[in-house]
Amino acid sequence: MKGGDSYSFRGKHISLALVSLFLFSTLMWTWERNPIATTLRSAREWYHLSSEFPVEAPMGSVGNTKLEMGIEQSLIPITGNRTKSQTDTEGAKTIDSIPAESPESQDNQNVNSSSKSKVCNYAKGKWVADTRRPLYSGFSCKKWLSTMWSCRMTQRPDFSFEGYRWQPDSCNMQEFDRSAFLRKMQDQTIAFIGDSLGRQQFQSLMCMATGGEDSPEVENVGWEYGLVKARGAIRPDGWAYRFPKTNTTILYYWSASLCDLQPLNITDKQTNVAMHLDRPPAFMSRFLHHFDVLVLNTGHHWNQGKLTANRWVMHVNGKENEDKKIAEIGNAKNLTIYSIARWLDLQLASRPRLKAFFRTISPRHFFNGDWNTGGSCDNTIPLTNGSEVMQEGSSDPVIEGALKGTKIKILDITALSQLRDEAHMSRYTVRGTLNSSDCLHWCLPGIPDTWNELLVAQI
């Protein structure tokens, strides 16, 4: 009997085990088809998928630049199609889509969401009188402002041009506050690269950021960027200053054409200089990773007289240009602008925090002749040709076209500056003698201050 009881007890255990196994299998089969289980399993798998990240494009000729792609293990979940790339007309790869939830994706989402609403067109608006202008004194901002551009230091008798500010039509642009600006730009570097009008914008921002005061605490850090005066040079190739309390750096580098300039014979001071139309300035290539905000401009040095005087010889694809169409000044300038925009856009793929701007051309106001044929700009009455800009597109279609489809923002100042012919240097000088009129550069304080207000509003 005892043996029978033992076998009966074992049979019950085996039956219970079989029933438990059946119930467990049924439960797992049901769980596998449960949507919740599927969701949880997918979430775990996200963290083991590989994703593609852009690798910095080579710093060479724009036409030959390619954006290489590196494959890395990512901790970023991918919630859609895998990252893809497409090839543009120049053979350079650009990012078509990026992993969801990445910083780049968040930026794109912000852009997409803002584009659905009304986007502010800062270039469309009007000039309005403002008794709180100017933003700084032309008398006191001596450390940062070139004397030749400080109209308050000349014999000019009228300064009504200082009393206006720009009011965009479709958005509220906050009044510039230097303390708020420096806090906003803490631990960041703003770089201006361009011609003498870019230098004016740089000096304007220095005066705005210091309130036009001497500010001895501001450090000269030009040496960090090789911006030191060479022996025999009139001035260095640029300047760089740092505000130590916020670690904010503002710099300027002179590059009138935005081309890479290379002497053909470094041992000969009279050598010709290769003007590589399809390469960015070496300075920009070298220090781009230091910049958080970059503002480019070019335009007025694109004339045969300047090229001849500087002994600049056009080069494309690393050799002297033989294409007669490219040799035409307008075509050469356009090639450079489009090339630099394309190169910079490729760099932005690996530098999502860099905000890049291309400023449109600053208008000239020579009347009854040009700069060398007696042209002048003697008007002293503000806004004689109107106060409003109502057009939607830019008055600089070359810059506008070059930036289309890129991440580079347009700093559109052409049309609003066109209305201010009374704000140029005109014929007045610091020496007190009348000079041939400068109807290209602006008095400071003046119109470049507005350019910087538009820049700060868009940073």
Image: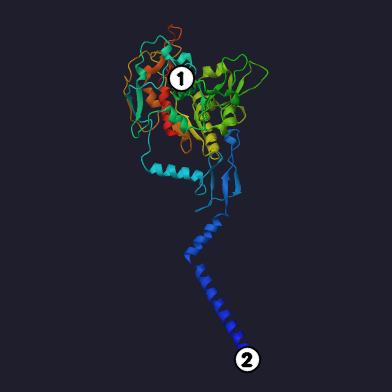
Q: Is residue 111 above or below residue 380?
A: below
Q: Nearer the viewer, mark 1 or mark 2?
A: 2
Q: Could you say which disc has been placed on residue 4 in the image?
A: 2
Q: Are the residues at dot 1 and dot 2 in contact (C-beta closer than 8 Å)?
A: no
- Of 289 and 320, the residue lying toward us: 289
Q: Quadrant of residue 373?
A: top left
Which residue does the image show at 66% across and 20% down from the upper left? 266
Query: Regarding mark 2 in the picture, which secondary structure is present there?
Result: helix
Quadrant including the C terminus: top left
Q: Classify 286 as above or below 114.
A: above
Q: Which residue is mark 1?
A: 213
**From mark 1 to mark 2, how far is it between C-alphas?**
107 Å
Residue at the front extreme of this rendering? 2
Residue type at the position of mark 1 = Glu
Q: In this rendered view, identify the residue nearer to me: 61 or 215.
A: 215
Q: Quadrant of the N terminus?
A: bottom right
**At which x and y percent is residue 61?**
59, 33
Mark 1 element type: loop
Pick the front one: 107 or 220 = 220
Residue 162 in the image, given as x and y percentages of width and height: 37, 19
Task: Name which of mark 1 and mark 2 comes first in the sequence.
Answer: 2
Q: Position of residue 48 (x, y in %)?
A: 58, 55
